Amino acid sequence: MFIFAWLNNQLLKMQWLSDLVQGFVERVLGLSVQDQLGGSIHFFVYDVVKIFILLSVLIFTISYVQSFFPPERTKKILGGYRGITGNILGALLGTVTPFCSCSSIPLFIGFTSAGLPLGITFSFLISSPLVDLASILLLASIFNWKIAFAYVVAGLILAVIGGTLIGRARLEGYVEPFVYSNTMVNTDQETVTLKERLGFAGEQVLNIVQRVWLYILIGVGIGAVIHNWIPENIISMVLGQDKWYSALIATIVGVPMYADIFGTLPIAEALVYKGVGIGTALAFMMAVTALSLPSLIMLKTAVKFRLLAIFFVVVTIGIIILGYTFNAFGHLLV
C-alpha cells in the first residue's frame, strides 16, 4: 500500500514537480505560494507541465494500441454484434480513441459508412470525447482514483444508454446520404511495421498537442484565477452544493464552450477546491467535451436536424442526471 501511494504521488500526481515549482516560485521569484500571485503561478506552471507530460506519454501509448484498429478492422470486430452488447463495445472502443468531439466525428462517419448500426456508432461518438484511458489517470492525478473510475463508469453508461435509445428510434433515414456512400480503404495490418506504428503514435502526440495546447493553457489559466482570485462565497452563491440548480447551470454553461477533458480538468479542479459539488464540476466537464457547439455544427453536416436534436437532448438530460447523482453521492468518493 505504501509503494502504491508513493507511486501515485510521485508518478501520477507528480509531487516532485509541485515541490520543484514551489521552490522556483519562492526562491527565484521571491513569492509565497500562499499568496494570490504566487499561488496562481504555482497552480499554472505545475498543472500545465503535469498535463503535458501525462498527455504525451498517454497519447503515445494509446495511439500505438489504436494503430491495430483501423475502421475496417473495427467493423469486423463490431459487425457481428447487435443490441446492448454492440453498444457496450462501441462505448468501450471510444475509450481508446484520444480525440476531442470534433475529431471523433470523422470516425463516426467512417464507422457509419462501414455499415455499423447507428446506435453503436453513437455510443462511440458519445464516449470518445467524454471518456478515454488518459482521463482516468488525469482525473486520478487531480482528484482521486474513486472519482476517476466513477467518472469513467458514468460516461460509459451514458454512452451505452444514449446509443441504445438512438438505435431503437430507428433514425437511419436522418443520416445524410453522402455518409452511406463513403468507401473505406482496406489496409493490410500485417504489412504495418513496428517503426510505422511508433511513427504513427509520435504523429498523434504532435497532432493532438498542437490541437489542444491553447485550450490547456486557457483552462489552466481560468483554473488559476478561480483557485486564487475569486472569493469562495461568490462561487458558492452560484454553484454551491446547496443550490439545486447548480448541475443544470454548469451543463448549460458548458455547451457553448469548446475544449477537451485536458483543458476542462483544471477548471473543475479549481471549482471543487472552492466548494462546488463534484457532480456540478463533472457535469460542466461532460457538457464541454461531449456537447460543444463546434462539434454539434460539424455533426450537423453528417446528420439531419431531427437526429441531431435527439442526440443533443438525450446526452444533455443524461449529463444533468449524472451531475445530480454525483452531487448526491459524491461524499462517498472523497
Image: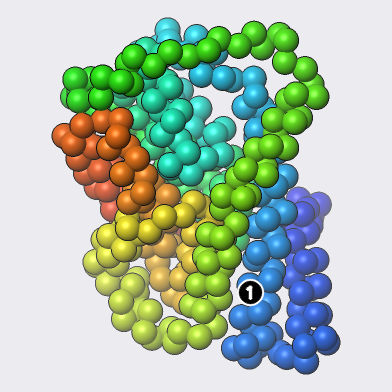
Residues 306 and 12: in front is: 306
**Depicted 214 relative to depicted 132: above or below:** below
Where is residue 276, by image quadrant?
bottom left
The number of callouts visible is 1
Give the colour scheme shown: rainbow
**Depicted 160 relative to depicted 113: above or below:** below
Residue 308 appears in the rendering: yes
SS under mark 1: helix
Q: What amino acid type is highlighted by mark number 1?
A: Phe
Residue that carries the numbered disc 1 in the rendered image? 43
- Is residue 62 left or right of 227 when viewed as pictured? right
Which x, y percent locates residue 126? 38, 37
**Depicted 11 relative to depicted 267: above or below:** above
Which x, y percent locates residue 160? 36, 31
Where is residue 2, by image quadrant?
bottom right
Which x, y percent locates residue 302? 30, 30
Residues 45 and 186: in front is: 186
Where is residue 323, by image quadrant?
bottom left
Determine the residue positioned at 38% across, 86% down: 233
Determine the residue positioned at 69% across, 37% down: 203
Determine the residue positioned at 30% across, 34% down: 301
Which x, y percent locates residue 231? 44, 87
Residues 38 and 189: in front is: 189
Neighbour tally class for label 1: few under 14, some 14-19, many 20 plus, Cα within 10 Å? many
Determine the residue positioned at 42% across, 62% down: 281
Residue 270 appears in the rendering: no
